[in-house]
Amino acid sequence: MKKVYGTASEALEGVLHDGMFIAAGGFGLCGIPELLIAAIRDAGTKDLTVASNNCGIDDFGLGILLQTRQIRKMISSYVGENAEFMRQYLSKELELEFNPQGTLAERMRAGGSGIAGFYTKTGVGTMIAEGKEHKDFDGQTHILERGIVADLSIVKAWKADDTGNLVFRKTA
């Protein structure tokens, strides 16, 4: 299997399809895979569900996929810097599943490890817990969170080798 490609578009060729679930790395505008995001935009892949800390800003990061209406649903922990995100959500053009940051990270880790779900106290008694299974452990209520299994995960690395090992730089 080829692990190194000349361009982001080449890396995504034959992988993208409408309706797919993408997990996107980065935090805000730091460490985001902007070349892969642009390649997804250029491919025109639509009806996407994206799990990421947030959706960038209006003209950068995942925000460019909002501009082109390619994202149907966001699973995020923060939504505050993107006016288009807010507009689409409030007008019911965009579905949002809001998660606390640690829960979102753990859902991704769990899904990647083959763990279907886990119980956490985070979110108990809030709208996050609505519709989720509740269970008591040692006298404390926990809610069931499902692991996230994506069709594709995109990350930004500083460099890679031919076997697929990645090197990340600084906080990214």
Image (tube, rainbow, N blue to C red):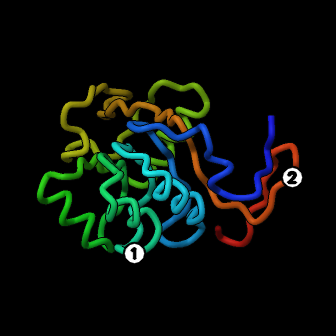
Name the kind of residue labelled 2 in the image: Asp
**Label 1 Cα neighbours within 10 Å, binned few <14 / some 14-19 / many ≥20:** few
Residue 10, position in %: x, y? 68, 50
Vertical placement of residue 88 versus 150, above or below: below
Q: Is residue 15 left or right of residue 121?
A: right
**If you read the primary sequence from the N terminus, does the residue marked by circle 1 or circle 2 appear first?**
1
Q: Quadrant of residue 81?
A: bottom left
Determine the CA span between mark 1 and mark 2: 31 Å
Q: Which residue is mark 2?
A: 161
- From the viewer's side, name the closer residue of 47 and 106: 47
Say what secondary structure mark 1 lies in. Answer: loop
Vertical placement of residue 84 versus 70, above or below: below
Say what secondary structure mark 2 lies in. Answer: loop
Vertical placement of residue 48 versus 169, above or below: above
Kindly give the residue lying farthest to the right in the view shown: 162
Q: Residue at x 41, y 38 (%)?
A: 18
Residue 46, position in %: x, y? 37, 46
Q: Quadrant of residue 85?
A: bottom left
Q: Residue at x 40, y 31 (%)?
A: 146
Q: Residue at x 50, y 36 (%)?
A: 150
Q: Which residue is mark 1?
A: 59
Residue 91, position in %: x, y? 11, 58
- From the viewer's side, name the closer residue of 2 and 90: 2
- From the viewer's side, name the closer residue of 6 and 64: 6
- From the viewer's side, name the closer residue of 83 and 146: 83
